[in-house]
């Protein structure tokens, strides 16, 4: 099983991969990495919804088939996926923001729950399909503010609409796996739950790293809602490597050993509070950087959340490569190159090369 524990360029070369959400922050990094390995990629997603956006800056559409579409539209995604006839589906399209979900719960459930249903329905019509990896989040678990990490067999839950929608998406995957993808002739379906993903090229609203960089760039103090909140922070390439290793295992083993839920998170010591992130980023940015606490009333957010990744380490032989301090330094370096108007596709590909060479 040489494909276990590492991302194999040889495996991905000429593989047909259908990626939903390819225009987003994580989807753009995923698409670039797949391109660099010679995969044949089709992306299906909304147009980028931030300005600036990584998809445009890094010219992600250069070497893939790029389609603007909505996962809430069953007919369109079925037509798109069936025409492409992929071997692997990476479902990443989502409404990914907690505070946005409070204001737009219907859109959030439609996208995250019914969008997942539609992707899996579309997948049933693809003759060449071998593996599906559906990406959710660490927030899919019923959060009890435990000091230890959540394991894959913990109950799904969610205090807020976003977290609840992702718990629902996980239940959808379980139901489809047991009802439709349960034979040796059907695709293997797995779900992947990642921690708080950070990296260069994220400009989303109400996310810590983008908020920090926007403030520093304008010589303003970062306004922080909950400086003591602890999260499993990880560079964007870490969980993507996990999705790739998981997909490789699903394809190379047509049984059901890997068709399950999987956690991809950082080392325990990199589950740090927000104020540690702020202090470290302030130090790495230098002059003009600082932060202060938001005194306004804000919606509920989890105080403590951590993933147990023992299963991925033991069975997939997957482990994170970069420590959090290195990740934050890499993000600052990436953003400074963006401000200098460097070729961001080259910057991203070089970062992927550096990550894979470790």
Image (cartoon, helix red, strand yellow):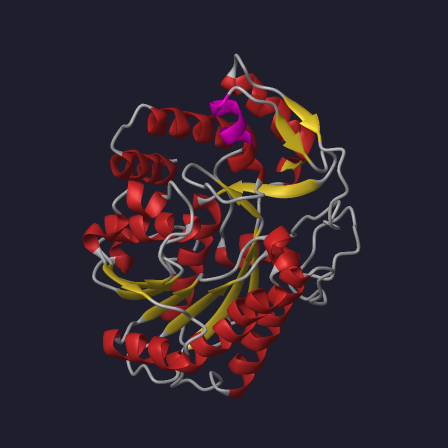
- Magenta stretch: helix, strand or loop mostly: helix
Can see residue 258?
A: no
Q: Position of residue 250 (x, y in %)?
A: 42, 69
Is residue 321 toward the left or the right of residue 23 in the image? right
In the image, residue 215 lies in the stretch drawn in magenta: yes
Residue nearest the viewer, comparing 354 with 312: 354
Is residue 269 toward the left or the right of residue 320 in the image? right
The quarter of the image holding the N terminus is bottom left
Q: Position of residue 77 (x, y in %)?
A: 36, 75
For residue 56, what is the image quadrant? top left
Is residue 338 toward the left or the right of residue 134 in the image? left
Residue nearest the viewer, comparing 212 with 146: 212
For residue 228, what is the image quadrant? top right
What segment is highlighted magenta in the picture? 212-218
Q: Position of residue 167 (x, y in %)?
A: 64, 67
In the image, residue 86 lies in the stretch drawn in magenta: no
- In the image, residue 355 sits, relative to residue 172, either above or below, namely above
Q: Position of residue 62 (x, y in %)?
A: 20, 51
Is residue 27 toward the left or the right of residue 85 in the image? right
The quarter of the image holding the C terminus is top left
Residue drawn at x 77%, y 42% is 297
Residue drawn at x 58%, y 81% is 175
- In the image, residue 248 sits, relative to residue 208, either above or below, namely below
- In the image, residue 135 sits, relative to residue 347, either above or below, namely below
């Amino acid at each position: 099983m040489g494909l276990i524990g590492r991302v194999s360029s040889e495996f991905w070369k000429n593989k047909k991969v259908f990626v939903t959400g390819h225009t987003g922050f994580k989807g753009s990094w995923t698409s670039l990495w797949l391109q660099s390995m010679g995969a044949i990629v089709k992306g299906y997603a909304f147009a980028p919804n931030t300005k600036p956006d990584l998809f445009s800056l890094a010219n992600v559409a250069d070497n893939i088939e790029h389609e603007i579409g909505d996962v809430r539209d069953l007919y369109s995604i079925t037509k798109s996926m069936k025409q492409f006839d992929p071997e692997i589906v990476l479902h990443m399209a989502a409404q990914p923001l907690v505070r946005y979900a409070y204001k737009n719960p219907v859109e959030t459930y439609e996208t995250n729950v019914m969008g997942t249903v539609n992707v899996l329905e579309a997948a049933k019509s693809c003759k060449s399909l071998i593996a599906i990896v559906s990406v959710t989040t660490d927030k899919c678990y019923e959060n009890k503010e435990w000091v230890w990490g959540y394991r894959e067999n913990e109950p799904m839950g969610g205090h807020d609409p976003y977290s609840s929608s992702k718990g629902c998406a996980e239940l959808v995957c379980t139901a489809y796996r047991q009802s439709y993808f349960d034979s040796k002739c059907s695709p293997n379906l797995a779900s992947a739950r990642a921690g708080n993903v950070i990296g260069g090229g994220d400009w989303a609203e109400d996310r810590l790293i983008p908020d920090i960089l926007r403030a520093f760039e304008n010589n303003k103090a970062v306004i922080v809602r909950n400086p003591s909140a602890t999260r499993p922070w990880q560079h964007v390439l870490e969980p993507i490597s996990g999705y790739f290793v998981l997909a490789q295992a699903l394809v190379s083993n047509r049984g059901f050993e890997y068709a399950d839920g999987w956690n991809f998170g950082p080392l325990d010591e990199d589950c740090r509070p927000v104020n540690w992130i702020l202090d470290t980023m302030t130090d790495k940015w230098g002059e003009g950087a600082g932060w202060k606490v938001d005194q306004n009333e804000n919606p509920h957010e989890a105080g403590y959340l951590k993933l147990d990744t023992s299963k991925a380490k033991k069975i997939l032989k997957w482990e994170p490569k970069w420590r959090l301090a290195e990740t934050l330094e890499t993000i600052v370096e990436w953003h400074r190159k963006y401000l200098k108007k460097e070729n961001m596709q080259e910057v991203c590909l070089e970062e992927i090369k550096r990550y894979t060479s470790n």
